[in-house]
Image (spheres, coloured by chain):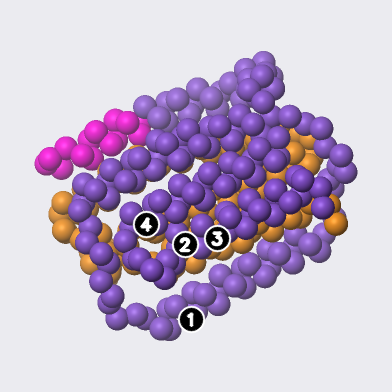
């Protein structure tokens, strides 16, 4: 097996393993453990991005997700001082139907992926480095308006968060 | 068999299902929120894979915007959770049922 293929299987396995540990960890029900495994999931996924030649997005993934977003998560977990989630009575009907629905969705998605003609090029040579993405973003004109809208969105989110975290909501 | 678009899409689909399972099964609001992030990441992986195998950078631009919006969404959502916790002293979904009829 060629090295990139082996690396794909390695990173895919790690991503799914850590993702499963985020959702259901048999050893700990502490939210901090979930957050730590989410960081590992994101790092493994950055490896997949590198394999897909999306170098810029791999770096952004680690900087923004594993760095900023997860620090925010951990900060809130520490702030709320959550105790170990105690077991409550589990709703067996909900678990069975929920798992069944998710399994059905997974089956449908997999069938669709492997059943149709996906129209892919056999030997792709596209490279998503900073230069290529910057040229795509700023010179085509296609993404200039969305870019500005996203900046406004970030401003709105910031104002909203400041308003929400005030002591008295009026 | 060489690793192609199908393999990446399968990983993405499985990751999405894991995230959905977490949203359905877990009872802690913060863990549900992390599962949502997992689902967003699965969609990102599918977009990057399509971008790579169709030789078109538009998919990666889309992921760029998704990451930005997700960062804003996390900030607002966590602020909401903190505000809820202040009122109810709980981050458990079964305690947050004031909208229930």
- Give residue B19's position: percent from left, percent from top: 50, 59
Compute the Cα span from label 3 to label 4: 14 Å
Q: Residue at x 45, y 25 (%)?
A: A151
- Identify the residue at image location x=68%, y=63%: A109
Location of mark 1 (residue)? A96
In the rendered image, the quadrant that contains the C terminus of chain A is top left
Disc 2 vs disc 4: Cβ atoms closer than 8 Å? yes
Asked if the residue at tag 3 contacts the one at tag 2, i.e. Cβ–Cβ closer than 8 Å, the answer is: yes
Residue drawn at x 37%, y 57% as measured from the top left: A33
Q: Which residues are magenta?
A: A156-170
Identify the element where label 1 is drawn. Answer: helix
Q: Secondary structure at mark 3?
A: helix
Q: Chain of mark 1?
A: A
A71 to B12, vertically: above or below: above
**Where does the image place residue B8, in percent across and percent down from the top left?**
70, 52
**Which badge, 2 or 1, comes first in the chain's sequence?**
2
Q: Is residue A55 left or right of residue B33?
A: right
Query: Chain ID for label 3?
Result: A
Checking the image for residue A33, the label placed there is 4
Indicate whether residue A157 is drawn in magenta. yes
- According to the image, label 2 marks what residue? A21
* Residue A73 as seen in the image, left or right of residue B47: left
Q: Is residue B40 visible?
A: no
| Chain letter, colour purple | A
Q: Earlier in the sequence, mark 1 or mark 4?
A: 4
Question: What chain is the orange one?
Answer: B
């Amino acid at each position: 097996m060629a090295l990139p293929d082996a690396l794909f299987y390695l990173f895919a396995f790690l991503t799914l393993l850590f993702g499963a540990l985020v959702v259901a960890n048999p050893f700990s029900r502490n939210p901090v453990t979930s957050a730590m495994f989410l960081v590992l999931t994101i790092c493994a996924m950055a490896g997949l991005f590198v394999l897909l030649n999306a170098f810029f997005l791999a770096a952004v993934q680690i900087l923004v997700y594993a760095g900023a977003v997860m620090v925010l998560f951990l900060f809130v977990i520490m702030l709320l001082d959550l105790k170990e989630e105690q077991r409550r009575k589990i709703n067996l009907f909900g678990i069975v139907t929920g798992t069944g629905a998710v399994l059905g969705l997974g089956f449908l998605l997999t069938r669709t992926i492997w059943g149709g003609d996906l129209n892919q090029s056999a030997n792709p040579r596209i490279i998503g480095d900073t230069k290529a993405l910057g040229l795509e973003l700023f010179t085509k004109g296609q993404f200039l308006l969305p870019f500005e809208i996203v900046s406004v969105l970030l401003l709105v989110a910031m104002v909203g968060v400041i308003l929400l975290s005030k002591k008295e909501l009026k | 068999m060489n690793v192609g678009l199908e393999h990446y899409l399968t990983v993405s689909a499985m990751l999405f299902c894991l995230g959905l399972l977490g949203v359905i099964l877990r009872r802690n609001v913060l863990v549900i929120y992390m599962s949502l992030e997992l689902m967003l990441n699965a969609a990102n992986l599918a977009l990057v894979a399509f971008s790579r195998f169709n030789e078109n950078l538009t998919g990666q631009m889309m992921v760029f915007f998704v990451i930005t919006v997700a960062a804003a969404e996390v900030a607002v959502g966590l602020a909401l959770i903190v505000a809820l916790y202040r009122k109810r002293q709980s981050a458990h979904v079964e305690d947050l049922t004031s909208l229930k009829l």
